[in-house]
Image: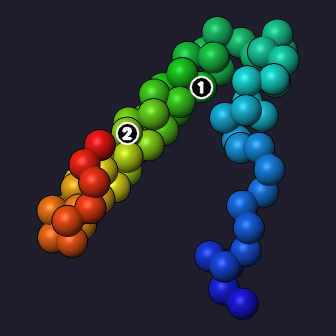
């Protein structure tokens, strides 16, 4: 069985991060965290847009419903 065949774990990393106590972090550490999270947001948006374009192309080819 491939790793891609396994069910996704419940919850996600973003939800877990949202519950983390930020008090122990310094301002520099928080700034670094913001930069990393902003980069992750851009990565997710790019993937979402790519998936939407792929879906639109498939719908156009196979006559699926448009969203």
Q: Farthest residue toward the bottom? A: 1
Q: Identify the residue at horizontal 73%, vertical 32% (top origin).
A: 15
Residue 45, disc: 2
Front: mark 2 or 1: 2
Residue designated by label 1: 33
Q: Nearer the viewer, residue 34 or 42?
A: 42
Asked which colour scheme the image uses, the reply is rainbow
Q: Nearer the viewer, residue 2 or 37?
A: 2
Residue 9: x and y in percent read: 78, 57
Q: Is residue 8 above or below residue 37?
A: below
Q: Is residue 54 above or below residue 52?
A: below
Q: Residues within 10 Å of mark 1 (few under 14, many from 20)?
A: few
Is there any visible trace of residue 26 in the rendered image? Answer: yes
Q: Identify the residue at horizontal 48%, vertical 38% (top origin).
A: 40
Q: Could you say whether the residue bearing mark 1 is in a helix, strand or loop?
A: helix
Q: Is residue 54 above or below residue 14?
A: below
Left/right of residue 30 with respect to residue 57 in the rendered view: right
Asked where in the image residue 28 lies, by quadrant, the reply is top right
């Amino acid at each position: 069985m491939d790793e891609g065949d396994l069910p996704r774990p419940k919850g996600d990393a973003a939800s877990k991060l949202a519950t983390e106590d930020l008090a122990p972090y310094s301002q520099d550490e928080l700034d670094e965290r913001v930069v990393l999270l902003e980069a992750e947001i851009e990565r997710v948006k790019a993937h979402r847009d790519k998936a939407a374009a792929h879906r639109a192309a498939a719908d156009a080819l196979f006559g699926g419903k448009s969203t």
